[in-house]
Image (tube, coloured by chain):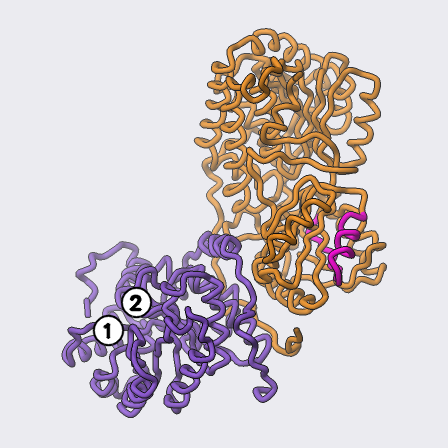
Chain colours: A purple, B orange
Amino acid sequence: MASKIIIPDFRKTPPVDQVGVEERVARFTTRSVKKSSKMEGLKMVLSMIDLTTLEGKDTEGKVKQMCYKAAHLHDVIPGIPTVAAVCVYPSMVKTAKEALKGTSIKVASVSTAFPSGQSTPEIKILDTKFAVENGADEIDMVISRGEFLSGNYNFVFDEIASIKEACGKARLKVIFETGELSTLDNVRRASDLAMYAGADFIKTSTGKISPAATMPVTLVMLEAIRDYYYLTGRMVGMKPAGGISTSKLALQYLIMVNETLGSAWLSNEWFRFGASSLANDVLMQIAKETHGVYQSSDYFSKD
Amino acid sequence: MSTTKEIKLNFNAAWELAPAPEDTSHISIKSQYDLFINGEFVKPESKKYFATYNPATEVKIADVAEANEKDVDKAVKAARAAFGKWSKLSGKERGKYIYRIARLMQERAREFAVIETMDGGKPIRESRDIDVPLAANHFFYYAGWADKLEYAFPNRKPKPLGVAGQIIPWNFPLLMAAWKIAPALAAGNTVVLKPAETTPLTALKLAELIRDSGLPKGVVNIVTGAGKTGAAIVNHPDINKIAFTGSTDVGKIIQKAIAGTDKKLTLELGGKAANIIFEDAPLDQAVEGVINGIFFNQGHVCCAGSRLFVHESVADLVIRKLKDRMETLRIGDPMDKNTDVGAINSKEQLTKINEYITIGKNEGAEIYQSSCNIPKKGFFCKPTIFLNASQSHRIVQEEIFGPVLAVQTFRTIEEVIEKANNIPYGLSAGVWTDKGSKIFNLTTKLKAGVVWANTYNKFDPVSPFGGFKESGFGREGGLHGLAAYLNI
């Protein structure tokens, strides 16, 4: 199958109509998720979170604390899943890996001179290899947006392919930083390009630029995944990151995934939320569904 | 573009949404409704009542009076008596009343939405987000024109026509009432309106609202009944204008009936719109437009995009996307906030749709239906598409007025223009392409009153709406809609 895939001309990516995309998104947001389906959805959201800390001030201590939180979100209520992964800088991979020993939680590392991507190809490969050698299960790379916007699609394609090679067994997530791509047509083009170059996941944002993930951008990427799946039969994962901090919004994203790609994508193998504060809001909702009343935010650990 | 056929997306929900029924406890419906004549509800001279049912449950909701010729005459007399004062009232004062109706409608929006869904079967999402807000918008819009008629038609000294007889269909009961009543009142006319016999309740609730608004007595009269009542309105000698929305067959009868009289006429009749997808279109959004075009309001829309023309080079992909999208439609209880496709309006209509589905199969078109389950009770029809349809198929030529789409492919622009125009109707059309020049080329050549580009089923009070050929004549909405109620 894979050998038959013809790499398309990325200058001729299918067009996207922004007005239509926004209308479709509006439909997802009017879905009403109640009772048992809400509880099920909330737990699914938790299990799909990449708990993230990507700051200059990150320390081993901070990462260790976050890793404990990742495995023990809220032990007061039984039956709460763990998050899917923690997402850290390459220098913190070793610490995270050790802290998560014995759990099924993955360690994801950003790489390729995250978040700007402004470095040489050699350094980006080294950056990636360093993370993988330290035990990263997943690599979140950024594309060179400058090259992309100036039309050097081959450069970006080769860049992704080379990082994919450097990843070895680690799964590769490709970050577009859609807030810098300006149009939905560009988002679609970047999606196609990354999937053909070997991305296992495509991801909206670094979280360092506003706007980060939005529902229209995510829908365009999901539709690109669907078209690629139609053509090749290969599933590609999706990770919106940044700006998703409420349960309500997260559930709307799940509705969108469910109605665009179907139930096969509704697991943390194929869908992730890149978020730092989402988990506590979801926990608060789960506690409310369990006890019938809202609790103060001080009843949920902040790590 | 070839696609792998064996790969299919799975929408058999692993994550099932729990029922989310809209609260219905806040509405008030009487068990029996009389006729609204001269500002009050009066018993019918006919002494007859008929029942209106919830098409999703087949349960009776209320009994409604059946107006005979005497009742219609009473209503017309009331409207005539009110006309003098109403038409001489300053435009500013008339506008105030219409604004008040609009605001009251917004205040009672939830109740109107619930009753619209109960009586007609359309999903609550649509009545809540489209029918009721749009109806209020029409009143707001025309209220604004009431004191500006001389600016709308400069140097023409516009004068109202007199008493308008208005007959509306069952697919958008409240919205059609608003489309008819708002411009008539703004122009200074008085009104006798007849809602459809299967969906009279929101018009009767509107009558209550109008009574509460303090509108002078007799300016709006609402009489209920079936075809006979409509005929009594059409044939009444003291009516100056007939505005009808409904089937082409009835439209023809009306036109014959008023031939030789002074009555003015606007007809908004059937349609069989073509949605045209070119290979350079944004395909995912185009598919969404097709879904919205044919399954909105169960396809009970005169401008429904009931024919789809797809460029052959993208036909496989578009049809595959269309089928997958159909699998995600939720069909069932119209009162559930997650329902996308509700109940067929009546048993008669369901029978008619099913007849056409049989015809389509016999004609040799390839049928595809959503794999969903439909409720056992109530009138429901699975979303249906017919692939490989031909121009000479009856399912391509005739209006089905249900969730049934006929799909054809085309190769060239000339071919698709010819086929799109090759039907007796000409109400609306949709064009999907990323190329602006192609859109303008088609809008000049498609014989349709409304042509949507890269969208479908967009309605706004400011935009005129109406058809060519057997889709009728006259325009509703915008300045054109106002002109239809004035001597200019």
What residue type is disc 2 on?
Gly
> Can residue B319 be found in the magenta stretch?
no
Q: Horizontally, is B397 left or right of B303 in the view? A: right
> Which residue has dot 1 on it?
A54
> Mark 2: which secondary structure?
loop
Q: Return the residue nearer the eye: B232 or A213.
A: A213
Looking at the rendering, in which quadrant would you find the C terminus of chain A? bottom left
Q: SS at mark 1?
A: loop
Which residue position is annotated with label 2? A207
**CB of mark 1 within 8 Å of CB of mark 2?**
yes
> What x and y, as percent, mark residue B64?
65, 27
Instruction: Check the image and report above or below for B460 versus A109.
Output: above
Q: Is residue B362 above or below residue B88?
A: below
Q: Is residue B15 above or below residue A99?
A: above
Within 10 Å of the Cα at label 2, are there few (<14), some (14-19), or many (20+) other Cα atoms? many
The magenta region covers: B402-422
Q: Residues within 10 Å of mark 1 (few under 14, many from 20)?
A: some
* Amino acid beneath label 1: Leu
Q: Residue at x 21, y 78 (%)?
A: A68
Q: Is residue A291 left or right of residue B22?
A: left
Q: Which mark is residue B233?
A: none
Label 2 marks a residue whose chain is A
